[in-house]
Image (spheres, rainbow, N blue to C red):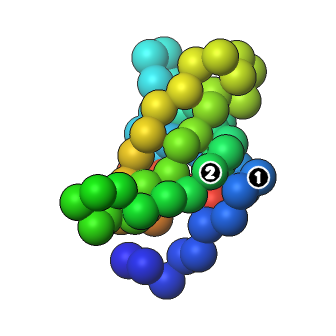
């Protein structure tokens, strides 16, 4: 699934629909780094509220069943 390359500034949308059929939220990649466990991660921020952040592995973000690159 690593056919997608992510860079800072890329936008992703969660594929799973939310309540009442709404589209998933959009996330912006802020930083990409390798953790102490050797896994590549990305810090992402919610597009509508940049104070809401989380860290996810690149494997999760490039899984087309979970996220799509915009």
Q: Nearer the viewer, mark 1 or mark 2?
A: 2
- For the C terminus, the quadrant is bottom right
Q: Is residue 65 visible?
A: no
Q: Is residue 54 visible?
A: yes
User: Is disc 2 surrounded by few (<14), some (14 to 19) or many (20+) residues within 10 Å?
Assistant: some
Kindly report the distance in space between the C-alpha atoms of the residues bearing marks 1 and 2.
8 Å
Q: Determine the image quadrant of residue 6.
A: bottom right
Residue at image location 56% in from the left, 57% down from the top: 32
Residue at image location 63% in from the left, 60% down from the top: 69
Lower sequence index among marks 1 and 2:
1
What number is the disc on residue 31? 2
User: Is disc 1 surrounded by few (<14), some (14 to 19) or many (20+) residues within 10 Å?
Assistant: few
On screen, residue 26 versus residue 63, left or right, reads right
Q: Position of residue 46 (x, y in %)?
A: 63, 28
- For the N terminus, the quadrant is bottom left
What number is the disc on residue 17? none
- Dot 1 falls on a residue whose secondary structure is loop
Q: Determine the image quadrant of residue 55.
A: top left
Q: Position of residue 38 (x, y in %)?
A: 28, 67
In the picture of the structure, the residue carrying the numbered disc 1 is 9
Depth check: 67 or 44 in front?
44
Q: Are marks 1 and 2 in contact (CB under 8 Å)?
A: no
Residue at image location 68% in from the left, 64% down from the top: 7
């Amino acid at each position: 699934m690593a056919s997608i390359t992510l860079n800072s500034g890329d936008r992703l949308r969660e594929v799973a629909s939310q309540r009442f059929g709404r589209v998933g939220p959009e996330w912006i990649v802020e930083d990409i780094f390798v953790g102490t466990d050797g896994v590549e991660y990305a810090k992402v921020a919610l597009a509508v509220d940049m104070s809401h952040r989380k860290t996810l592995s690149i494997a999760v973000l490039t899984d087309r069943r979970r996220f799509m690159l915009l």
